Image (cartoon, rainbow, N blue to C red):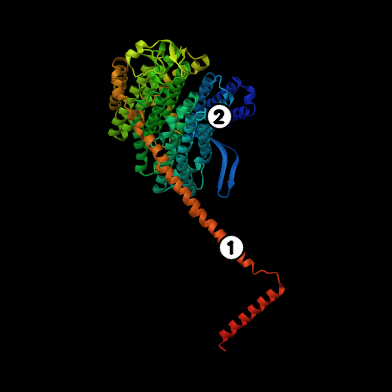
Amino acid sequence: MTNLVWLIPGLPLIGFTLLLLFGRRLGEPQAGWLATSTVSGSFLAAVAVFFSLATKPPEERVYEITLFEWIPSGELSIGLGFLADPLSITMALFVTGVGALIHMYAIGYMHGDPKFSKFFLYLNLFVFAMLMLVLGDNLLITFLGWEGVGACSYFLISFWHEEPANATAGKKAFVTNRVGDWGFMVAMFLLFFNIGSLKYSDIFSSVIEADALTQTTATGIVAMLFIGAAGKSAQFPLYLWLPDAMAGPTPVSALIHAATMVTSGVYLLTRMNPVLAEAAGWSIDMIWIIGLFTALFAATAAIAQNDIKKVLAYSTVSQLGFMFVAVGSGLYVAAIFHMITHAFFKALLFLGAGSVIHGMHHEQDMRKYGALRKVMPITAFTFIVGWLAIAGIPPFSGFWSKDEVLLAAWNENKIAWAMLLIAAIMTAFYMSRLVFMTFFGEKKWGISEHAEIEGNEEQTETATDSEADTEDGDKHEVTPHESPIVMWLPLVILSGLAAVAGLLNLPFSYGTKHLEHWLEPILFGNEVHVTASGETKWILAIVAIVGATTGVLAAAFVYLKKRSLARQIEHSVLEEAWRFDATVSNFMGGPGRKGFEATTLFDQKIIDGAVNGVGKVTQRMSTRMRSLQTGLIRSYALGMFIGAVAVIAYFVSRMGF
């Protein structure tokens, strides 16, 4: 069944081709179901390959297939091939599984959109690119998928490009990711110059068996790989594109921020773990330090966001920071474990937010929500499951994976553990804030859209409960409603996965660590083993539970009891993410723009001027010299005579007569 590995990316590519040719003719909803069926078929192919690998001994769970030679160029020979091993198939399973559910959800969410078929065209292309990224047997194929998801993210984030803000968000994502792509390319160049191949199997054998990389070279490669990973996985300071990516339709947010694009950096660093093992310690420390700072930074920003999707966006940045802490600590299994559980509960939360937005007639401000659990019970129930998972409440999946990451931080540095625990407590707080403002408390969706809604109880009492002002001053009925089955069915499935995914890697005994056993062959013995005793692990787990519970209770006290305290917490500096984005934007629009204009002027006047000047001098000299070419034979004869006399005179003078 491993021979079916080419079908995993092949089916979404077929779906993309069919939608490109016949998408408009198929229309709604047929185009959506076609796209969903191809990704579902890809998931079934991934399941088949998984079971085929699982039946083999651990040392034989690697399957490579080359379809054809892609780039034959001297010493560089790149084949279009696929690598099926525990890591790539794990990624393929949740990319296609969650991706299929998001496709199904999008059929309902995008209902009535005039570009319905084009949206699914982009979704299929995105999934194809992501699968090429994780299944490629060499770095160039991975880079092909890497660039593919970057291009598709631009198409999808700016899908509603009629709004200038949406178009700007798409461009921002595209440009920011190019910075990371530069790091990826330099890492590839260094690997090829030192090893002579970009194929993973050649790289790993050269590094592990032949010791082909010096520590200095390996450190440079790791630093460049980290820059690439930071761009795709939104680590500070390259996180800037991700919050703005909320401009895209909600299914795009779920696809990009949950199971696919943002996990690429974690996948890349985990895949290249033999190279990381050869690098200097400071470069590895840099990974977990940046991850820790990103986790804390984004958590503080999420506390003060009022846009429901912005809260989840900063939450994604923070959770990715957790994964980088695990990678930098050498606990790759913990990073992949949290990546899997995050794919389930974050996709659930984004789709749940989309269901709320859909039911609230595209309103995204949480201050205009409240008490929605009564009118959207399925969305509320499933969202609460995702909330408990990300908050780290046992027995939901997020508790188990986040506990592993906290243990990784403890094993690395006790101060790092304390700071990451604070980030975890803040996660429980801001996600509880989101849930309480959306599904509990007093309903705000009867308030005039133009009224001040900062939790003022008097406004709530005087506003009508069933009407809201439109922009032209007329009133219309605001009636939140539950989403159709095509939207809530994926929520139910994802809520089940978010609840039980922790079973993949329970810490109770060696026999319950299924994910660790599964990934062991691709780690080449580079997984760091935690030195903490069993008693210490229990104490740390209890502390994590108490911390998460404290975060939930604190949010309940503030947002259900003492709403006036919220203003002291939701500081404008936090709402603007410490104004880092604004500072960068102001710099790029001010001194940065002037610098670019000066560079352009230098290029035009100095560089181009020098080139054009040489051309003009040559042209003028040739024009003057052209006058010597008269075309008269006697002139040429005279010139020859004068030249001959000059030559004879020269030789006579040299002879000394």
**Marking on residue 33:** none
Against 577, residue 210 (above or below) is below
Is 433 situated above or below 273?
above
Per the image, the residue denoted by label 1 is 620
Q: Provide residue 51's location: percent of width, then percent of height.
A: 52, 26
Few, some or many residues within 10 Å of mark 2 (<14, 14–19, 20+): many
- Toward the front, the furthest residue is 473
Amino acid at the residue labelled 1: Arg
Q: Quadrant of the C terminus?
A: bottom right
Q: Hey, what amino acid is under mark 2?
A: Tyr
Camera-side mark, 1 or 2: 1
Residue 505 in the image: state x and y as whole percent. 40, 25
Image quadrant where residue 507 sits: top left
Say above or below: 613 vs 509. below
* Circle 1 residues within 10 Å: few <14, some 14–19, many ≥20: few
Question: Between residues 629 and 117, which one lies in front from this camera angle?
Answer: 629
- Percent across and percent down for residue 462 are 36, 11
Which secondary structure, mark 1? helix
| Residue 33 visible in image | yes
Which part of the image, by quadrant, shows the N terminus? top right
Residue at disc 2, secondary structure: helix
Seen in the image, is 511 located left or right of residue 535? Answer: right
Residue that numbered label 2 is attached to: 122
Specify the farthest residue to the right: 633
Q: Nearer the viewer, residue 83 or 259?
A: 259
Residue at 32 percent across and 15 percent down: it is: 560
Of residue 336 and residue 571, the one placed in the foreground of this image is 571
Circles 1 and 2: CB atoms closer than 8 Å: no
Q: Is residue 112 left or right of residue 515?
A: right
Name which of mark 1 and mark 2 comes first in the sequence.
Answer: 2
Q: How many marks?
A: 2
